[in-house]
Image (cartoon, rainbow, N blue to C red):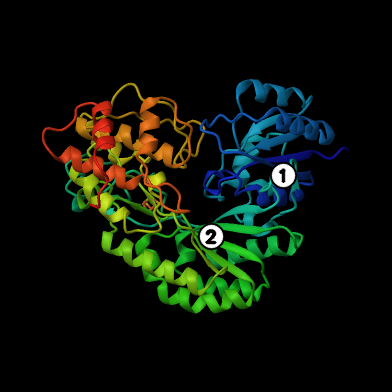
Amino acid sequence: MKRKRLLLIELLPHEPERQFRTAAYPWLMGLAEALGWQASWGALGVRYEPTLRYRLDAGDLALLRAELDRLKPTVALINEHLRPEQWAALAKALPGGRLIYWPMESSLEALGPTFESLVPEAHGPVLRNADLLARLRPGFRRRALNRAPWVNSLLMRVVCGAACVYRTPVSGNPFYRKLRLPSPIMGCSFCASFPLQKPAQDVVAFAAGEIAQACWQLPQDVERRFELRCQGLWVRLEEFIRELIRLKASRAELIFMPRIDELLAARAALRRCLPLLAKHDLALRIYGMGVENFSPQENLRLNKGVTARQVHEAVSFITATVKAWPGRFLCEPGRLSMILFTPWTTLEDLRINGEHIAVCPLINPCCVLGQRLQLFEDRPITQLAEHDGLVVKRGGPFYNSGCIIQVEQHEIPWRFKHPEVALLWQLSQRLSAAGRGQRPSDTLDKTASGLLTRSGDSPPNPLPAFRRAVALMLRRPRPRTLDRLVELLARESPRDL
Ligand code: SF4
C-alpha cells in the first residue's frame, strides 16, 4: 500500500518576532514517522507583512506549487493563512490532497488529538497516547524552498511549560478591583494569561533533549537558534545549560525573553553560565523584554510590576555583560519594547517616558514612538477601557503586531481620553516613520522628517523633537492642530531638555 505523505510548510519571516506556529513541526515529523507516514518539511523565507492573511510573492507561490506537485502529499500543513486566491491556487496544485492551516502555537500537550481532528486520514493508538511526546523523536531535517538569506538558519520555538507565571491579585490594583474580572489573579493587563498548568514533563530534560536532537541532526553549516518560551527553564538556567553540555549540544543560540525582574534575579546564575557557554560553543540571547511604560500610573494600569529603576539596572547589567562576553551574551540595542500610548495617556506620562527613553540605550526611539496599546477580547485592560467609555466602533488600519498570533484574532479599536495626546500620537507616528526611513507621503511627513536630530553616523533620532512637542503641549495656550504643532516645532530652535 502507498504510504501517506505529510508536508510541513514553514513560512519563515525575516523578523524572528513574527515567527509563529512551527513549535510543533519537529514533533509532527516524529509523529508522522510513528504513524508510518513519509514526512518532509519545507521552509520558505518571507518578509514580514502588515497583513496576517499572508500574500506570497509570485515567485514563492510558484516554488510552493512546484513542491506540492513534486511531493504530492496527502496533507500539507502550513503555519500561516494565505490570501484566498493564493490558498485556492495551492489547493488546486494538490489534487487528491489537502492544504490545512496549522494553528498550534503554545502547549504541545494536545498534539495527538489536534493532529487527529485536523487530519482524519491519520489513525493509530499512538495519537491518543497520554505520553505521546516522550515516545516521539523530533525531526529537524528541513529543506529551504527559496533563497532568502535567512531561510537556512533554523529558528525553533521550544515550548514545554508556562511561558510566564507572573500573576498579581486583582484586589491589589486600584484600576481593576472595581471591575468584575473572571479571575482573582491577573498578569499584565493587556496580555492573554497563559494557563498555569504544571508541565507533563521535566522542562529541563525536555528542552535540552529537543535541542540536542536538533544539534545532532542538523548539518554543521546550519545556524541553530532556539527560542525558549518557558519560565521554568529560565529559573533553572544553570541546570539547563549543564544538561545541554552533557548531551553534547553545541553551536546553538538560546534565546530567552524573561521579564526584567526575572533577568535581575538571574544575574548570578548568568555569570556562572557564561564561561560554560563559551567553552562549549553555545550562546545566550535576550530579546523582546517589555518595559511597557516608565510612568508609574500607566505601569500600574498595565499591571506590569516593573519599576524604572529596575529597567535601568537591567540595562546596565546587559550592556556590561554583552561587552564582557562578545558573541556569547547577546542583546542588540533597541530590544526593549514599550507601550507608549494607551487610551488614558496624559502629557505628564509622555514627559516622564521621554526623559527615561533618552537615557536607555536598549530602547529604540524610532520603534517605541510608533507603539501603542492594542486591545483584544478577554483582557482586563479591554474591560477597563469599556468601563471608561474608551472603546469605539471603528478603528484605523489593521496592524499586524507580534501580539496577533492567531488568524481569527481581531483588535478592538479605542480612542484617546485626552485630545492633546491624540495629537501627539499623530506626530509620534510620523516621527517614528521618518526615523525608520519611510518615504514621506505628504508635506507634514516631510516637515516631520526635517525635525529629526541628525549627528555623525548615528541614525536620525526622533526623540528630541518628540520631547520638545510634549513640552510645547504642556504650555498654554497649546496648539490645537497637528499642522500648528509641527509649524511651532519647526520654528523653535532645538534645545536640550
Ligand atoms: S506581558 Fe509578558 S510578563 Fe506580562 S503577563 Fe504577558 S508574558 Fe507575562
Question: Picture coordinates of residue 7 (x, y %)?
Answer: 74, 39
Q: Is residue 223 above or below residue 32?
A: below
Q: Determine whether, in the image, residue 372 is placed left or right of residue 327.
A: left
Q: Determine whether, in the image, residue 415 is placed left or right of residue 242.
A: left
Question: Picture coordinates of residue 419 (x, y %)?
Answer: 20, 30
Residue placed at 43% from the left, 71% from the top? 320
Residue 190, image quadrant: top left
Q: Residues within 10 Å of mark 1 (few under 14, many from 20)?
A: few
**Residue 388 in view:** no
Name the kind of residue labelled 2 in the image. Answer: Ile
Give the residue furthest to the right: 1
Question: Picture coordinates of residue 62 (x, y %)?
Answer: 75, 29
Tally of marks: 2
Q: Which residue is mark 2?
A: 255
Between disc 2 and disc 1, the foreground one is 2
Residue placed at 43% from the left, 67% from the top? 319
Between 26 and 113, the one nearer to me in the picture: 26
Q: Secondary structure at mark 1?
A: loop
In the rendered view of the protein, which quadrant contains the N terminus? Answer: top right
Q: Which residue is mark 1?
A: 124
The residue carrying mark 2 has its beta carbon less than 8 Å from ligand 1: no
